[in-house]
Image (spheres, rainbow, N blue to C red):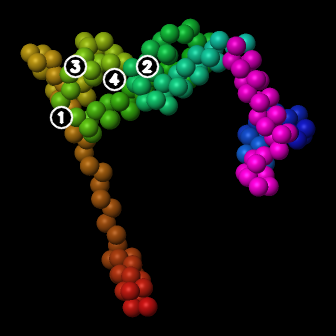
Amino acid sequence: MPTAVIMEENFDKLLEQCEAQELEAPGGIATPQVYAQLLFLKYCYTSCMQANPELTAIWAVGQHIWQRDFPGIYTAIAAYQWSENILPVMEALRESTRQRAYSLVAQAYTSIAAEDFAAFVGYSVEEAVKGVVSQGWQADPATRMVMPKKPDPPPVSLVPNEQQLARLTDYVAFLEN
């Protein structure tokens, strides 16, 4: 590992250099020094995770995000008492995940069980039903189903006539040659 990069604590650049060394290794096999560096980083990672429980909790949230486990994301965020520096980030993450869940349900479902929807957005069933009504969706208390309102399709941008003509001309010229 280049000492200058380590002293600057520029870990992104260090990562780029390690990846470049591994990819540019002669014969496709990295040197023992590269593998020693990677092992060192692995052990540093483990010791850092053990030394900081908040980092471990952040990692747990990240794992749920990676697995697209929406209920797990909300559970992992709620399971830890975040520091005042991290709390706004986690609240923003929870809200953006919730908005993403609303968007996905609106695009993918014509109806969904209220319990499933509540788990997907991280609310209790009552809060979820109130949320869907405020969004203009329908909720049927008899069947305990939520009927999302389909989002409006994005406006189709019309290509100006000159651009369309130029594109067609290029296409015809390509076909003739």
Q: Is residue 78 magenta?
A: no
Element type at marker 3?
helix
Q: Which residue is mark 4?
A: 120
Q: Quadrant of the C terminus?
A: bottom left
Q: How many neighbours does mark 2 have within 10 angstroms: few (below 14), some (14-19), or many (20 or more)?
A: some
Task: Determine contact: label 2, label 1, CB under 8 Å.
Answer: no
Label whose residue precedes the other's in the sequence (2 or 3): 2
Mark 3: which amino acid? Ala
Mark 2: which amino acid? Gly
* Residue 40 image-quadrant placement: top right
CA distance for labels 2 and 1? 24 Å
| Residue 26 tag number | none
Task: Determine contact: label 4, label 3, CB under 8 Å.
Answer: no
Q: Which residue is mark 2?
A: 72
Q: Which residues are magenta?
A: 22-50
Q: How many neighbours does mark 1 have within 10 angstroms: few (below 14), some (14-19), or many (20 or more)?
A: few
* Residue 135 image-quadrant placement: top left
Element type at marker 4?
helix
Q: Which residue is mark 1?
A: 110
Judge whether 147 appears above or below 173 on screen. above
Q: How many neighbours does mark 3 have within 10 angstroms: few (below 14), some (14-19), or many (20 or more)?
A: many
CA distance for labels 4 and 3? 10 Å
Label whose residue precedes the other's in the sequence (4 or 2): 2
User: Where is residue 137 drawn, in percent x and y?
Assistant: 20, 29
